[in-house]
Amino acid sequence: MTVRLGVIGGDGIGPEVVAEARKVLDVVLPDVQATEYDLGAARYHRTGDVLPDEVLAQLAGEDVLLLGAVGDPSVPSGVLERGLLLKLRFAFDHYVNLRPSRLWPGTSSPLAGVAPGDIDLVVVREGTEGLYCGAGGSVRKGTAAEVATEESLNTRYGAERAVRDAFDRAMRRPRRKVTLVHKNNVLVNAGDLWARTFAEVAAEYPDVQTEYQHVDAAAMFLVTDPQRYDVIVTDNLFGDILTDLAAAVTGGIGLAASGNINPTRAYPSMFEPVHGSAPDIAGQGVADPAAAILSTALLLDHLDRPADARRVEEAVGAEVAKRVPGEKLRTAEVGDAIAAALAG
Amino acid sequence: MTVRLGVIGGDGIGPEVVAEARKVLDVVLPDVQATEYDLGAARYHRTGDVLPDEVLAQLAGEDVLLLGAVGDPSVPSGVLERGLLLKLRFAFDHYVNLRPSRLWPGTSSPLAGVAPGDIDLVVVREGTEGLYCGAGGSVRKGTAAEVATEESLNTRYGAERAVRDAFDRAMRRPRRKVTLVHKNNVLVNAGDLWARTFAEVAAEYPDVQTEYQHVDAAAMFLVTDPQRYDVIVTDNLFGDILTDLAAAVTGGIGLAASGNINPTRAYPSMFEPVHGSAPDIAGQGVADPAAAILSTALLLDHLDRPADARRVEEAVGAEVAKRVPGEKLRTAEVGDAIAAALAG
Ligand SMILES: CC(C)[C@H](C(=O)O)[C@@H](O)C(=O)O
Ligand SMILES: CC(C)[C@H](C(=O)O)[C@@H](O)C(=O)O
């Protein structure tokens, strides 16, 4: 069965790491029909548009999407992030933003006394609501009387499907634990909605252990006791912060993969490394493609090919374990080595 | 000159740690007229009210306030936090929520390779705006069609006074660096207001080095490179998360002090440990009073007694450095030892 793959290299190191991810996909997924999309800062400067409707419609016809990174210092902050990345997440109803964090063998945590295998958590970050809706505005901009608002929109519908996904995932993991993270002592409306939804869904999963934590406490525990987490479910903004933090305690953003998933398959899901476009090292062939390649493992899971997904993860893990600390990494060599290991 | 001190022990371990902080204040600030306020869960259960107007008016007549902790599992989440703690912060216009994080000699960071002296940062968390205003609501609560909102309110007036305070503080510190943390690629209205305000104020402080970071990146850098920070200025919610994280990387919340400050002195400022009421260990006399005692150092700074403030910090530092890892701590003994050292 041919898999239609939409490829958005994007900005900075995005195209470089995506090229390596594709080498790996070429090995494990032979029947791929890939289409490259020219989106990002270069297109914006050339044409003035970010994501035209006809391109969005074409992307909607793909089975899965692979994205590198979005954002460039030459474009005002927010234009590409909101106009391209968030537009895709919202248009394709990517309500599960899936972000696993694992301390891989051969990598070291900045935390003292934490060994590979100790940390193995996954964050289900709600991807279509909260403060990411763009529901805000300003008055008297640029004056001393300026007021700016940002509104967080939350629905039972949106919270419930994310929470359900978290519980379903927990049931497939050995520890079967879900932690809800919010700030329900301050954000009483949204926090109460999430907490009630969580309690009601939890009642349907008696085998799953549950806990609740405020986001400030969770940030602390990710540093002092990351081992305690199995599945974390949280809203869009808290998920953004906690997943970068979880990446940091598991050796850094170089290995952090993510999936923007629509589990109903009504729209194509999109897989991307958590890291950004890193303009400072773009074009030098020194970016670590591991996170992009690990994102293809999540893509393979989504295509119901878990055995291939695990093979990719193992190949990445083996390559990372072989790295010599301090030795300069070449993007293409990492991709070649992992692809060769998978082909052999 | 007599200092009128309002004391709110509050809930859980609050009264226990505040008692030790008062022992220390009795030594360094001889002319104190203290009034204890019965506020918190017990009063709420007894009377049904949280902070009556006449008590608020009485508190307004104090020079400074010392608060233990607020929150109890027997009271619905948010009632005491919003009705007491946040009500005081807003009513007394505590626009500078000051939270220093220092790795004290004798304490150890959960981060590998970080030594005492390496981390010395202070967060200026805006305390009167953002998502903490309580501007949210719900419709169709409890149904499948429930919608809940939370609104973040931000003003030039509010951002500017916090940013200015951060730059003034940086000028009094050796490194003279201010980092603005926000999320201006997503929260474009509020983020842009903060970024423009920051740039304009920065222009008046040519000797201060500046940087901007998204909150997700800042969470990561607090783990991978906390040494980079001097003064961080950020909004209310981001400040809540980042200060708990900064406390965690500097050895935990047991040493995290804070001041809710109105620099204009139009209202009494309020000093409190960052930790919560810890109901699990309340009443046992085992809570660490160090954070409450360190909060009195911030109180002394506010009363323009920096020499006394430094003496208190040194006495706490010396006591902490003498602790034997694993040995059980007694709240009263810690307070007695620090007070005795200061009296001696
Ligand atoms: C680039 C930005 C809009 C994005 C987000 O905030 O979601 C990024 O930080 C991420 O986590 O994927
Ligand atoms: C108790 C809660 C309302 C409070 C806050 O969120 O500000 C606390 O976490 C803090 O940081 O002082």
Image (cartoon, coloured by chain):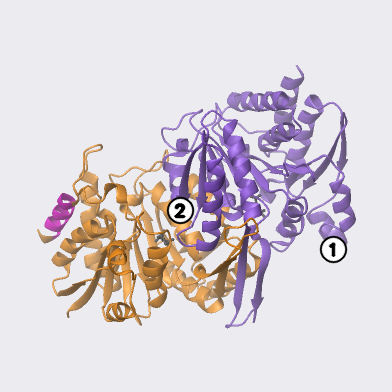
Chain colours: A purple, B orange
Judge from the rendering whether residue A98 lies leftward or rightward of residue B303; answer left or right. right
Q: Residue at x 53, y 42 (%)?
A: A203
Q: Main secondary structure of the magenta part?
A: helix
Above/below status of B217 relative to A268: below
Q: Residues within 10 Å of mark 1 (few under 14, many from 20)?
A: few
Q: Is residue B145 visible?
A: yes
Choose top left, top right, bottom left or bottom right for residue B341: bottom left
For mark 1, give the secondary structure. loop
Q: Which residue in the protein does label 2 denote?
A: A216
Residue at 32% over, 66% down: B44
Which three-letter amino acid code belongs to the residue tagged 1?
Gly
Question: Which chain does the numbered disc 1 sit on?
Answer: A
The N terminus of chain B sits in image quarter:
bottom left
Question: In this orientation, which residue lies closer to the viewer: B207 or B340?
Answer: B340
Residue at point 69%, 50% (across, down)? A279
Indicate which disc, 1 or 2, sits on the residue closer to the N terminus.
Answer: 1
Q: Of the residues shown, which amino acid type is indicated by label 2?
A: Asp
**The residue tagged with tag 2: helix, strand or loop?**
helix
- Which residue is under mark 1? A48
Residue A283 visible to the viewer: no
The image shows residue B78 at horizontal and vertical percentages of 43, 62
Query: Range of the magenta residues?
Result: B332-342
